[in-house]
Amino acid sequence: MARRPPTRAGEGSTRHGPVPFLLRLPADLHRRLAVQAAAEDASLNEYCVQRLAGPDVMATHRRSIAAVLATAAVVAGTHLVGVIAHGSWVRGEARDSSDVDVMVVVARSLPLTRDLYREWDASSPAWDGRPVDAHFVHLPDAARGPGSLWCELAVEGVVLDDRSGAVSATLIEVRRAIAQGRFVRKTAHGQPYWTEAA
């Protein structure tokens, strides 16, 4: 008996449950997806389904993200650890005049000086026509805790680049600490901040 060729997408498959989907990936991309899935406490399969099922910032804004990441790579060089988008644009609260906020995470071997900001401003990457406001940070010191900034990033940040998985791993640890009640969010003069629970 001759075998039927595999059904292609859109050719009228009547199956309603999960169907197998074979996809060949470059080894480096497979490794990065596996790291991101582990940071989200998900299997690689679950993570890929989540990424494919809904709106994907990485796909929708591919060119803008590429411009931001290229500028970050030029400014930070080999010290670049990762890039996180945050702020009003991520929350869906951006106005016509709003910029896009990004955190550029760099290794502690790179001092956080005004020169980094001057070099960024000289490049002026844009995000769908919006200016991109960058802030340069180090990963939190384990002995001192994540601080208010990293708590806020853990809640609303979108990871655009994570060279070794350290950024995603940090964010998941901070989210766990928040879920355990170790940090609480408060507001002063309309501005949110995080503090250790009493």
Image (tube, grey):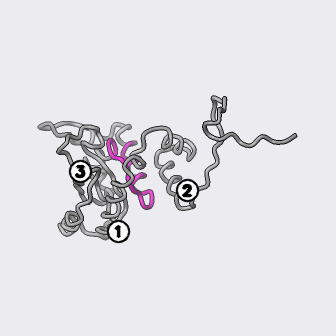
Residue position for label 2:
30
Residue 192 painted magenta: no
Residue placed furthest toward the left: 189
Query: Does 109 sit left or right of 54 as displayed?
Result: left
Residue position for label 3:
130
Dividing the picture into quadrants, the one containing residue 8 is top right
User: Counting other residues with Cα less than 10 Å from the Cα at mark 2, is it few (<14), some (14-19), or many (20 or more)?
Assistant: few
Q: From the viewer's perspective, is residue 81 above or below residue 128?
A: below
User: Which element is circle 1 on?
Assistant: helix
Residue 161 painted magenta: yes
User: Which element is circle 2 on?
Assistant: helix
- Tag 3: amino acid: Arg
Give the Cα distance between marks 3 and 1. 26 Å
User: Counting other residues with Cα less than 10 Å from the Cα at mark 3, is it few (<14), some (14-19), or many (20 or more)?
Assistant: some
Q: Residue at x 61, y 51 (%)?
A: 23
Numbered range of the magenta stretch: 154-175
- Tag 2: amino acid: His
Give the Cα distance between marks 2 and 3. 32 Å
Mark toward the start of the polypeptide (2 vs 1)? 2
Q: Position of residue 172 (x, y in %)?
A: 41, 46
Residue position for label 1:
79
Q: Are marks 3 and 1 in contact (CB under 8 Å)?
A: no
